[in-house]
Amino acid sequence: MEYPAGSYDVIVVGAGHAGCEAGLAAARLGCRTLVLTVNMDNIALMPCNPSVGGPAKGQLVREIDALGGELGINIDRSAIQMRMLNTAKGPAVHALRAQADKRLYQDNMRSVLEGQENLDLRQVMVDRVLVRNGKTAGVVVSTGAVFDAPAVILTTGTYLKGRVIIGELAYSGGPSGNFPSLKLSDSLQELGIKLVRFKTGTPARVDKRSVDFSKMTIQPGDEKLYNFSFVSGIKEREQVPCWLTYTNEETHRIIRENLDRSPLYSGFIKGTGPRYCPSIEDKVVRFSERPGHQVFIEPEGRHTNEMYVQGLSTSLPEDVQMAMIKTVPGLENVKIIRTGYAIEYDSIDPTQLKLSLENKEIPGLFSAGQINGTSGYEEAAAQGLMAGINAVMYLRGRDPVVLSRSEAYIGVLIDDLVTKGTNEPYRLLTSRAEYRLLLRQDNADMRLTETGHSIGLIGDQRISYFMEKKKMIYDEIDRLNRTHVPATSEIKSLLKEKGSDYQQGVSMALLLRRPELSYQDLLELPLESPDLPQEVREEVEIEVKYEGYIKKQRSQVERFEKLENRKIPPDVNFEDMKGVSNEARQKLARVRPESVGQAARISGVSPADISVLMIYLEQMARSKGEGS
Amino acid sequence: MLNDTIAAISTPPGEGGVGIIRISGERALDIAEKVFRPARSKDWRREGFKLHYGHAVDTVTGEVIDEVLLAVMKAPHTYTREDVVEINCHGGAVPLRAVLKTVLTAGARLAAPGEFTRRAFLSGRIDLTQAESVIDVIRSKTEASLKVAMSQLGGGLSAKIRSLQDRVLGMLAQLEASIDFPEDDVDEKSRQELRETAGEIIGGLDRLLEAAARGRIYREGIMTVIAGRPNVGKSSLLNALLGRERAIVTDVPGTTRDVIEETINIRGIPLVLADTAGLRETGDLVEKIGVEKTRQTIEEAGLILFVIDAAQGVTGEDCEIIKTVDREKTILIINKIDVEESPELPLEEEWSIPRVEISALKGEGIEILEEKIEHMVTGGRTGSPDSIIVSNIRHESALVKARGSMEEFMSLADEGVPPDLLSIDVRGAWETLGEITGSTVTEDLLDRIFNDFCIGK
């Protein structure tokens, strides 16, 4: 029997990485928030790899942090290793990546949630979203409890009709042995929401005591201490290494001989999997000429013997998994703790969403994370944060917060999803961003802290600290531009030692632009220089060294924004538009872009269609003007 | 797309001597300034709604392309309500195109079909009731230009462009895969290998651009000058080629005063012929204008038919003239062989060029001349030009732009610039070629990365 169980401003369904950020953002902005999970012990669970960050994802984490989200601080507190990747590939793509202690990560996040004012947690299974008078009204859970709320955020991950597959074995289930959510996706379909079926997978976990590390290459963390968050202030961290080994012909032979038992190849798996995260059987089939594939053995935490076997994601039958894994050097006597599996799940076609992550048809219903067709903890958290913020904006009748493709990877992520949709679990990549040079991990705070402050998630103390940093950066860039470096014989010979031929005096900024010189080199010259914090120096160095490129990209952004700022009123009837191609008309009507720029990114919409659209908009605006 | 500066030829294509290039947008005047050398008023920028006489010059070489009249119209009193500059060219289709190309090089974007009209509407210049007709214009022009572009982009050419684009994409996938998947087994190509590939792509683009130049010759013709001392029979030759009387044929030196432009078709190649007023140094002022004009015409010509008189032999003046012409594009014509046998030619190197003996009056040797012309213009590559011709200016400027991006990549790769910056130019080249083939970058790039590399740490 259904009964009223309470009423809230915002209900978040799911407490994974999206749900945690969504719930925290809503509660911190002053909304009475309820976060529902099927298992209180699995808050902020990392059911797949034990790491956070990497290219594009690392940038996301810092953006989340700059906006006042929790992921950055939490991973800093829970990391057991950090590395800066891509350091030789240019400033735009430096990428911080952390190995997490999974248990610690969960515990830390759970205590943040439990300590959060305005936020309640409940362990329930949500069966239904309530819609009254066309608007979101709450949720109904399996016990019959009805929770009322005008805004609901769905962050159900891979739980919707989850189906776990190991070889010939398949059963209904969520990840890591959890219950699936069987009824909720039917309820969504009844509300007219279109669902798609995706698949993802994970490798086996093995017992550290059974691994022979002497046959592997050690992969230690960086000596330099890094943090994701601009404010976490962690100053030391004991690091745990990862290990690298390879598959070989014997591994591949076993896989090939058992392909007929692989659910991927037998057609048993129907969902679409991610191409960037293929199973080992997929790699062996598609790249048959390769003699070996990398396998990383990564710790799942400081206080557990479980280790993650990165690179051997598989849905082969358990006996084949065991035979195959034992052919890998160092894993000859390995004991498997958890078997690798594939999981299929329902997700919603994200083109049904607005850029605020609200459903276009059902006001007050938001969604974030894997349910929107993405994969990855960071992608989920980023959406969760934005959905949480925008649920609050919705309740307060304010304009949603939408980040542009030119200001954040978060903007790229959400715009891609909403505008283009996705036909595989979506992962953010730096190559998806047009303005990569502007969207760096080092300047995420410069890009977004003030936005976070105006939203209300960044406090006064942090903003004043930020403003101070910003001023230091601007002042130092200004100083470098104004300070002349005389071509004295002393300076000449100092620069010669650094491989730089110096004849005529130039400004410090021009000197810094030479590829062979660094900011540190400038500090070593006999000139007066301020003593600045490391992060300020780093920012100054990149901004000055790459100024030419950065300026070029900024001017591209200016052109881009002209189209982005041409808003399309929500009442435009695309079906009525004459002069656009049929394909463009259908797609415009389906996606209902919010700006001319967004419309131009829809595949099948040509520049001529955009011309017509602009004329149509002008025509509308003028007739309205005449009418009033 | 909204406020950048656009340019296009705004007069219908055809044989007309005068054509107008219209430039509209914030930077119209700045762009015009790069291209236009005024004869008198240095203050032309401020003098709107007036015609300014001067020359259009190539922004790269500084060479004069054409004699032009320039009209400046300041916003908002223009068709588009933006600053508009119109360049009236006099030299016919070939220089008109050359001026447009220079304007594009100077920073304008080639206008999309119907874009001037669209801007006029969006700026409120055109009445609301006309909106639908504006849409019709865009639609029909787009369709028409697509049709033309498609027909011009024959199967062979499109395959060639696609294959180059594919190689660019391969480079991009290489760079991007190593950035986005730093810990995967991406077999990284060395910078040297990437540069080699870039060099091959540039070579491929060059071949297409050469084909473009040939294609243009077939479509728009080649500017041809008949040069020679007065009264060696230049007008007779013109008549012989034309097959009818056009210029006045007279024995008095220097009577063919005007530069007459005429197009004749030689084996499918339109020769845009300018008759000349003779190259003789002259004190006659009226005559002099003709002579100077002729000098200039010779410099700009793509083909020079240099005529000497067999009856008079090789004179000192002939020797002077041959020093001024570009021998790569000159055919020596020994006329009046019906009167006198072909004279001994001087041994100097400048005389060793293709030659034909003719009698313009009797029509002898004209066929051999036509053969030589065809051979010289096409570089011996005759036959079916359609399969490899890039004849659309949009396509051609995209090829030039893509080539520029690849060149930029080459020089940056030398300087040790990191991959995240290098990929900007490679992506630029890919996107530019995509404007021809109509492919979208991100999805194709990801397809390529996942296809070429075993990703999945």
Image: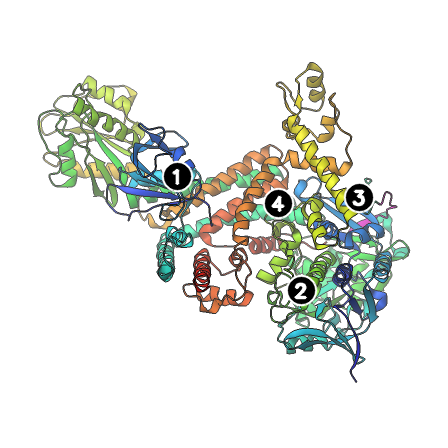
Tell me which numbered mark, 3 or 2, is placed earlier along the sequence.
Answer: 3
The residues bearing labels 1 and 3 have C-alpha atoms spaced at a distance of 51 Å
Q: Is residue A241 magenta?
A: yes
Mark 2 lies on a secondary structure that is helix
Residue type at numbered disc 2: Tyr
Tell me, for residue A226, which label it has, or none.
Answer: 3
**Residue B233 visible in the current orientation:** yes
Residue on which disc 2 sits: A394
Instruction: Give left or right: position of A437 versus A165.
Output: left
Residue type at numbered disc 4: Leu
Image quarter where the N terminus of chain A lies is bottom right
Residue B320, quarter of the rendered image: top left
Could you tell me residue B340's position as x and y percent?
10, 25
User: Is B366 placed above or below A436 here?
Assistant: above
The residues bearing labels 2 and 1 have C-alpha atoms spaced at a distance of 50 Å
Residue type at numbered disc 3: Tyr
Both marks 2 and 4 on one chain: no
Could you tell me residue A475's position as x and y percent?
69, 33
